[in-house]
Amino acid sequence: MKPWFSDAKPVSMLNAELCFLLKEEFYFGPDRHAGLDLSKLTQRLKLPSFQRSKPSMVRTAELDGREGELFAYYKQVVELANHHGLPFNSIRHYFWVRLWMWNSEEDVLVSFPWYDTYSEVSWFLKALLSVESGEVDYDIDEGWAMEVEAYEGHVYIRQMDPDSQLTHVCIRVPRAELVLQVQQLMARSTNSIMLLTEAMGEDVWTSYVRSEPVFMGTPAISKRRS
């Protein structure tokens, strides 16, 4: 038992979701854009039309067979990148995902701002499923630290700013219900990424992409024009 467990707020349950991030505009200007007229270097993107809880993301539960609309959004991004001669490294952030865990009624949000790919997310989710007692995860990055422990039928979660030692979240949640949420989430996430990969021709959500992908049978995104 860790000393901080006594400070953990009891929470009845947590929702868990993988979110595909969306952007309203495509930027095709130089990396350094201070002082530039961005209105001349951006193009509006058509977002999926189905209802979403947040305009800037799509949760796996919101897809439910609508992967085609999300594919259409990504297709725009690839076509614009090809048109402007941008390499994949310039557009990889359009394919980022996020893990969110929350309980709106009890005003709890656990965020993972440094996890951009599903492999990072799934590593954490698998640890939640496999560890019945002991350390589930300890991770730290710039301005963010996460401690997760399983103990006596609960999962304890503490999210902090390691620089200021400010605690943003300190909760305990019943493990059995959280495990069920995670199992369902992983099934949905795997299925959605599989369908998107079949449509795009490349999987750019699961892991960090190091070579230029070839989308939809088209040539790889060309190197950026000088």
Image (cartoon, grey):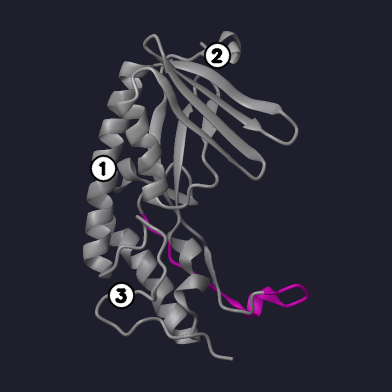
Q: Residue at x 58, y 20 (%)?
A: 170
Q: Residue 82: percent from the left, percent from the top?
A: 42, 83
- Tag 2: residue type? Lys
Report the front residue among 1 and 171. 1
Please state which of the two labelled residues, at mark 1 or mark 2, is closer to the viewer: 2
Q: Residue 197: percent from the left, percent from the top?
A: 26, 62
Q: Is residue 176 above or below residue 72?
A: above
As measured in the structure, the alpha-carbon distance from the residue carrying label 1 to the one carrying label 2 is: 34 Å
Residue denoted by label 2: 2
- Tag 3: residue type? Phe
Q: Residue 56: percent from the left, percent from the top?
A: 50, 51
Tell me where residue 31 sits by quadrant.
Answer: bottom right
All told, the count of numbered labels is: 3
Residue denoted by label 1: 188
Mark 1 vs mark 2: which is more N-terminal? 2
Taking the image as shown, residue 121 lies to the left or right of residue 68, namely: right
Residue denoted by label 3: 215
Taking the image as shown, residue 81 lies to the left or right of residue 64, namely: right
**Span shown in magenta:** 32-49
